[in-house]
Image (cartoon, helix red, strand yellow):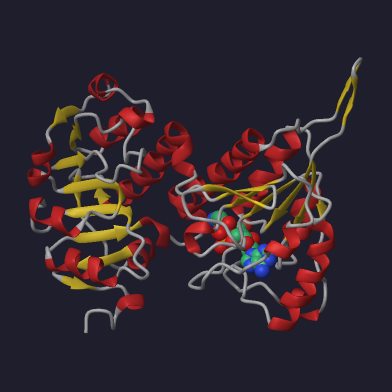
Amino acid sequence: QTLFIPKETEASEPRVGGSPETVKKLITLGFDVIVEAGAGVDSRIPDAEFVAAGARIGKTADIKGADVILKVRRPATAELKAYKQGAIVIAMLDPYGNEAAIQAIADAGITAFTMEFMPRITRAQVMDVLSSQANLAGYQAVIDAAAEYDRALPMMMTAAGTVPAAKVFIMGVGVAGLQAIATARRLGGVVTATDVRPAVKEQVASLGAKFLAVEDEEFKAAETAGGYAKEMSKEYQAKQAALVAEHIAKQDIIITTALIPGRPAPRLVTREMYARMRPGSVIIDLAVERGGNVEGAVAGMVTEVDGVRIVGHLNVAGRIAATASQLYAKNLVAFVETLVDKETKSVNINFDDELVKATVLTHGGKVVHPNFANAAA
Ligand code: NAD
């Protein structure tokens, strides 16, 4: 069987769905691997490294012969006519709000799996793209903040005087927020953090940061069985805003990562709040793609409002593309392995497997995922 790793067609996407390490693994699984020329260039993987790992270098049109296609982003509808009927596509398909594009994938006769839906269970940890990429985004957010901040992060005692440590506030302590705390601490920042899930409190403390939250009855019940945040009541949000407003006035750097599954990102930082920060303060909004946590954050731009720099970079994991691709490719190959019959070395999808059930969006010309059951109508 042929497995194709294309170059991503969106110019804003530097990542790639394969690495020399994963190509070797795919070959042992029985695949004939073709990598599109230049697919890895933006992730610092030259074609020669793919060849050394056993892949052939191909053209865009070679996608036609592919039984399995490993991508980063959803294929554009116009690209689908180049795909073979019955081909398997594995990517981050970002299906919510893109139902028509998913229907087009179904219409093209493609079996498509979306990696973001991988269940967060022990067996699938190695396939968890949300974690692998959010972890890097949290790290990169701090690096970006440090670059935008015109002062030093660590305390320095020099002959010419003492430089105070920067105060860094992390809002939303999921995978990205935890890595942001750890990174800001390594750079010498004095770190505080907030979240609406009580389970986070201990994790924040264990990383050497201070936890700040309105700890009322609603807070104590604010985690879903799946470990995600709930949307909080208006009353809670008001109490939370009052508490953080005072805190924000004294911070130098804020990194926001707060998301609620299936909902727009909660608005946590208003202009009124950051207007009280001193000039040169920096705010990084990692939720900007989902509506933003910060008033005035512009997707894809760095702006300055009231002397505060507001950073709304898109695809933050892609800003550290070489590492992001290395981990993403590993997530993909771990999933591919579960689709291959070890005896016959051929793809044999078990549609009863919970990983398949959770991630398969289209099959046999239809949108098959329960979350999109009505989308086709
Ligand atoms: P996420 O990206 O959905 O959200 C980021 C954070 O924002 C969360 O911690 C959330 O509680 C927080 N948030 C939401 N609304 C907020 C508000 N109003 N104010 C402040 N913070 C707010 O989260 P994630 O990074 O995907 O992690 C979600 C959970 O999944 C965590 O408990 C994480 O540890 C867990 N997880 C488990 C596994 C696994 O078991 N395999 C893997 C990864 C993550």
- Which quarter of the picture shows residue 135? top right
Q: Say which of 148 and 320 sits in front.
A: 148
Q: Residue at x 44, y 41 (%)?
A: 318
Q: Residue at x 66, y 35 (%)?
A: 146
Quadrant that contains the N terminus? top left
Q: In this image, 365 relative to 227: left or right? A: left
Question: x and y percent of residue 303 in the render?
Answer: 57, 48
Quadrant that contains the C terminus? bottom left
**Does 102 appear above or below 284?**
below
Which quadrant contains ligand 1?
bottom right
Q: In this image, 111 relative to 325: left or right? A: left
Q: Say which of 268 and 72 sits in front.
A: 268
Question: x and y percent of residue 188 in the render?
Answer: 78, 33
**Does 117 appear above or below 238?**
above
Question: Number of numbered discs present?
Answer: 0
| Whether residue 128 is visible | no
- Which quarter of the picture shows residue 215? bottom right
| Whether residue 176 is visible | yes
